[in-house]
Structure formats: structure tokens, C-alpha cells
Amino acid sequence: MKLVIILGMFIFLTFSASAGTFVETFDGGDLDEWREIILLDLKIKPGTWEIIDGELHGTMRHIGLPRLLTTGDEKWRNYTIEVDVFPLEKHSPGNIGIAARIQGTVGIISLIGDYAFPFPANPNPGLTVTCFGGDFHDNILHLFGTEVSPLLELGTWSTMKLQVNEDVFTLWLNGEQVLLARDDTFDFSTGRVGLVLTGYTVKFDDLVITGDGIPNKGKLSVTPTDKLATMWSSLKQF
């Protein structure tokens, strides 16, 4: 009986240890563990990414290809990505999103916005949420799902969350599910995570990644009062 109990505890601890939480608050002031990916391998000026007062500021003023700033490990498989987003300015039709399973130039992107990249011929004129994947450099992309959702409000903190679980991708905005998509081919099994931007200036903060195989790193800082107030204002709208 004692052997069974010990074995059970060992199995429980083994599986518990495999799940972790990776936190990036940007308080360190550097982007050493991040790198930008340019879609379609075009020789165009990279987006502007910088840390100001413990928050990641991203800017892409003109309509065009989304910019990806990625971090993590290409061996990560199933996980949930959550990040606080504060759109400062909207320069053109654009998108704000989360990237998952980025491995080299291949991966998955979920976007909220009014710029219908990469499927401008989509017949849905109200398209504001898109999930797609493929090889960005070869422009071989597959549409996994689309829905209609409110845009992120300027001057207000919102929370975006993307869960990738095998071939199912679920996106939430401020706690409300806005997209459930599926990859029938299931070619994108592991990879890094990232933030995506087109046509906006945005602040990102408190990135949290949880899941099996995710290393424990960092912890959330105390949330400022003004951030809580603006996030609560956004949540009350739903």
C-alpha cells in the first residue's frame, strides 16, 4: 500500500512539474529574448518595438504586413497566452493579435482588427477576427476561422487571450470568447509565441503563458490603479 501511495505521489509531482507559467512584465527594460519576424521575407523597414516605463510599445503606422515580435521556445506545444493591450493610436486599417507555434517562418496568427490580411477577398465585410496559419515567407496560408468582434478600444486596457490545444484555437477579448477555429491539417504542432501589430501604436504588458512544458519564469507586478480602472470600464461594456 505504501508503495502505491509513493508511486502515485511521484506521478502526480512529475505531471505537476511539467506545467508552468512564463511571465513577462517588461520591467527589465530589454528585449534580449525577443526577435522580430518579417512576413513574406520582404526587405521593408521593421516595426518599432521599445520598452517605455515597464511596458512594451509597438508602432506600425502604415497599412501593410503584420509585424511579429516573438519569444519562447520552438518546442512549446499546447499553451494559453494572455496579454494586456492598450491601443494608443490607430493610424490606418489595422490589426492587433497574438501569434502561436512560430517555428522559423511557419506559425499561427489570431488577429482582431479591420484590415482583412491575408484574405482581402473574404466576402464578410464585417470581418474583425481572423485565425490563419502557414509559411509566411512562401505566402502559403490557410484560413482556420473568422468571426465579427468589437475592435479594441483606444485609450483603454483590454485583455486578449489565445488558447492553442492540439488543432483547436480559441481567442478571448476581455473574458468573452470571440473566435473558435480549427486547423484540419494540424501542421503547426509546436513553436514560439508572439505579439502582432498592423496600423496601430499599442502598449503591451503582463504577458502570461501557461501550459505543459512551459518553464516557470517571472511573476506579475502589482497592477496600477489606473490600469485596473480602465480594464474594468472595458469589461462592463459586455
Image (spheres, rainbow, N blue to C red):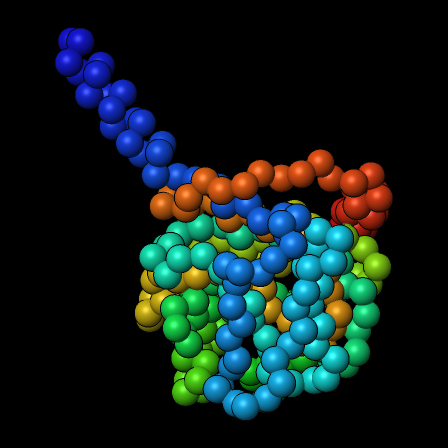
Quadrant assignment, res 1: top left
Q: Is residue 200 left or right of residue 210?
A: right
Residue at the image position 45 percent from the left and 40 percent from the top: 216
Choose between 183 and 204: the one closer to the eye: 204
Quadrant assignment, res 236: top right
Q: Is residue 237 above or below residue 31?
A: above
Choose between 33 and 133: the one closer to the eye: 33
Choose between 138 and 131: the one closer to the eye: 138
Q: Is residue 158 left or right of residue 118?
A: right
Q: Is residue 45 above or below residue 1?
A: below
Residue at the far top: name it.
1
Q: Is residue 17 above or below residue 145?
A: above
| Horizontal and vertical percent position of residue 107 | 43, 70
| Horizontal and vertical percent position of residue 22 | 50, 45
In the rendered image, is residue 122 in sight? no
Residue at the image position 59 percent from the left and 88 percent from the top: 44
| Horizontal and vertical percent position of residue 20 | 43, 40
